[in-house]
Image (tube, grey):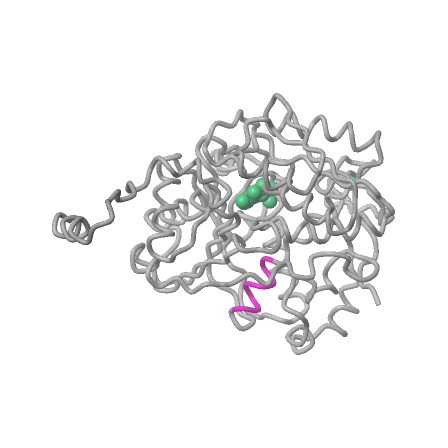
Amino acid sequence: MTYFTGLQCFLCGTAFPAKALFVCDQCLGPLEPAYDYEAVRADMSRTAVASRPKNLWRYRELLPIAGEPRTGLHSGFTPLVRADRLAREIGLQELYLKDDSVNHPSLSYKDRVVSVAATRAVELGFQKFGCASTGNLANSVSAHAARLGLDCYVFIPKTLEPGKIIGTSITNAHVVAIDGTYDDVNRLCTQVADRFEIGFANINLRAYYAEGAKTHAFEIAEQLGWTFPKHVVVPVAGGTLLPRVGKGFRELRDIGFVSDSMPKIHAAQAAGSAPVIRALHAGLEYPEPVKPDTIAKSIAIGNPADGFQVLQVVRETGGWGAMVSDSQILAAMKLLAETEGIFTEPAGGTTLAVTLALVEEGKIPRDESVVVSITGNGYKTTDAISGQLKPVVQLGRSLKEFETFLADR
Ligand SMILES: Cc1ncc(COP(=O)(O)O)c(C=O)c1O
Ligand SMILES: [Zn+2]
């Protein structure tokens, strides 16, 4: 039984068949999957969900595939970590980290969206699978393509961190590095997808891909015993994750799984690439493109595809947002590791630094529950932080030297 009924335009509601389509030919709005929510309400229960394997497919009634999942059987259901030491440091009473830095198999939130896009790519008959990426998506697309035996084409800006590139090349994917920004890469890929029958996770399969991000919200609610936190802080690049976190929470209310009021959803960006935060603060409906320049390369997108939707969801839920400098990002990466032992990449540092800023501004009251989305892993981007850390202690082999070192501390 599938509850997914086809695609529809997010703006004008026109219905489209469930093919590799992503833009409405009537109004140019983005397409999104439609579901038979009445049937979902009748058939899907919290008990049934609880009995299923701990992966993102446990919410499959609300995911846009026609048959059985083809990949992602170990993706999702990442830890929701209660972070009391960090909470004390920030002055919060109830703080959680949704830790997608340990998502399987490629260590970022992207394994959610790619599990769905790759399954759909196979269902639609694609033999080639690809993406335009700032790094993490490339890692995930190439990993899932390898498992499925798909020929893989990954396009990236040439300035990405070596760890991200190697993590893709190891799968024998075709890695194409473009002399330009992510926005240049994305523009090229839109032309490539049309011509060469490649299923691009975040272009012609984008409607399916984006839905996978709802599972981040489903899991937060389930891991909190089918309740919502008061606040969620989410990083924004192309703008896939944040609006789908909102959509996921809304669906859980609609199908009767959770009765709490919607969490306030806050947006996090690096100051060197903050088109959405600038638009939010200026009261604009659409972000104006910027040229990114930040160490948070995975979220350095100057012209976000779903920027409009991010602004809409932040405003609808009563959330807010902030942007932080590269030095604030590095400090937050260290703070997270020092208090909770979690090594995130600059995107996670951005989200935590923005959380601190929002607490300082009073947008997040100290006595209200907060979930911070940690979406990527620091072991991929060691070059960003290596110059900032305490030097390694260099000693000879004698006990005396260690004694002297301890005495001098
Ligand atoms: C680590 C990490 N976090 C967050 C994001 C945000 O992505 P988006 O806003 O496109 O969903 C990305 C996107 O590349 C990412 O790599
Ligand atoms: Zn339309």
Quarter in which the N terminus is drawn: bottom right
Q: Is residue 222 magenta?
A: yes
Viewer-side residue, 122 vs 404: 404
Viewer-side residue, 148 vs 205: 148
Residue situated furthest top in the rendering: 179
Q: Is residue 104 left or right of residue 355?
A: right
Residue 401 locus on image (x, y percent): 17, 48
Residue 396 locus on image (x, y percent): 24, 45
Residue under the image location 84 percent in, 43 percent down: 127
Q: Is residue 263 left or right of residue 386?
A: right
Q: Is residue 129 left or right of residue 104?
A: right
Residue under the image location 84 percent in, 49 percent down: 18
Residue 145 locus on image (x, y percent): 74, 46
**Magenta segment, which residues?**
216-223
User: Tag count in the figure?
Assistant: 0
User: Can residue 383 be seen by looking at this rendering?
Assistant: yes
Viewer-side residue, 312 vs 387: 387
User: Can residue 299 be seen by looking at this rendering?
Assistant: no
Residue situated furthest front in the rendering: 398
Residue 8 locus on image (x, y percent): 79, 48
Residue under the image location 55 percent in, 61 percent down: 78
Main SS, magenta residues:
helix
Residue under the image location 79 percent in, 33 percent down: 193
Q: Is residue 281 magenta?
A: no
Taking the image in four quarters, ligand 1 sits in the one at top right
Please tell me whether residue 312 is drawn above or below residue 176 in the rendered image: below
Please tell me whether residue 392 is drawn above or below residue 196 in the rendered image: below
